[in-house]
Amino acid sequence: MSMSSRPWYHWLAFGLGSGLSPWLPGTMGTLAVIPIYWLVVPYPMLYTAVLLFILAVGPWLCGRTARDLQAQQGGARAIDPPAIVWDEWAGLLLTLWGLPFSWSTLLAGFLLFRFFDMLKPWPISWLDRRIHGGMGIMLDDLAAALAATVILRGLLYGGWL
């Protein structure tokens, strides 16, 4: 099914198509939210509103899209399809939320978030295995974002960045 024939919410869940990349769709999805980050980072209230919107609609958006994909595959179980990258959008924006912009902060935040999202150390792996549906798709990335932001803030406030 082409992107143009998919429902509008697939387009959002796939990160405006970035999650359909054949190479590292999660990383491509995370890169795709950087222009949105650049647009909102100068405006803390707007940034917060965008983040809250992404968090609020994420469980429904990811869950509905995952169920649609499962139905298209004849019922094959797709717990967290790689093409769904809305959760990566939430993760990077949460990682960087409330921090002043700098290239080093953006790069470190991106790398830390991708590290925790890809490796899924405990308790991220526990969430990934135990909580399913749209909430599960979102929660492991939010946990990765929290781990990344703790380290990122430590680096920033410790003078390492």
Image: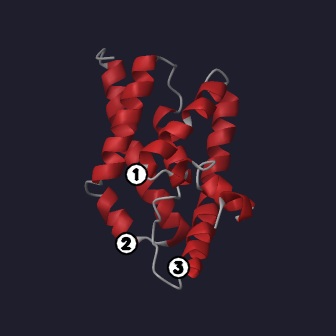
Residue at the spot 50% in from the left edge and 25% down from the top edge: 99
Q: Are marks 3 and 2 in contact (CB under 8 Å)?
A: no
Neighbours of disc 2 within 10 Å: few (<14), some (14-19), many (20+): few
Disc number lying in front (1 or 3):
3
Residue 130: x and y in percent read 37, 72
| Residue bearing mark 3 | 73
Residue 67: x and y in percent read 58, 75
Residue at the spot 52% in from the left edge and 71% down from the top edge: 133
Identity, as a three-letter code, of the amino acid under mark 1: Ala
The number of numbered badges drawn on the structure is 3
Q: Is residue 28 above or below residue 8?
A: above
Residue 50 horizontal side relative to residue 115, left or right? right
Q: Are marks 1 and 2 in contact (CB under 8 Å)?
A: no
The secondary structure type at the circle numbered 2 is helix
Pick the front one: 101 or 80:
80
What distance separates the C-alpha of mark 1 from that of mark 3?
29 Å
Q: Is residue 47 above or below residue 78?
A: above
What distance separates the C-alpha of mark 1 from that of mark 2?
13 Å
Q: Are marks 1 and 3 in contact (CB under 8 Å)?
A: no
The secondary structure type at the circle numbered 3 is loop
Q: Which disc, if any, is residue 143?
A: 1
Identity, as a three-letter code, of the amino acid under mark 3: Gln
Residue 134: x and y in percent read 55, 66
Q: Which disc, if any, is residue 130?
A: 2
Outermost residue to the top? 159
Q: Quadrant of the N terminus?
A: bottom right
Pick the front one: 55 or 63:
63
Residue 131: x and y in percent read 43, 70
What distance separates the C-alpha of mark 3 from that of mark 2?
23 Å
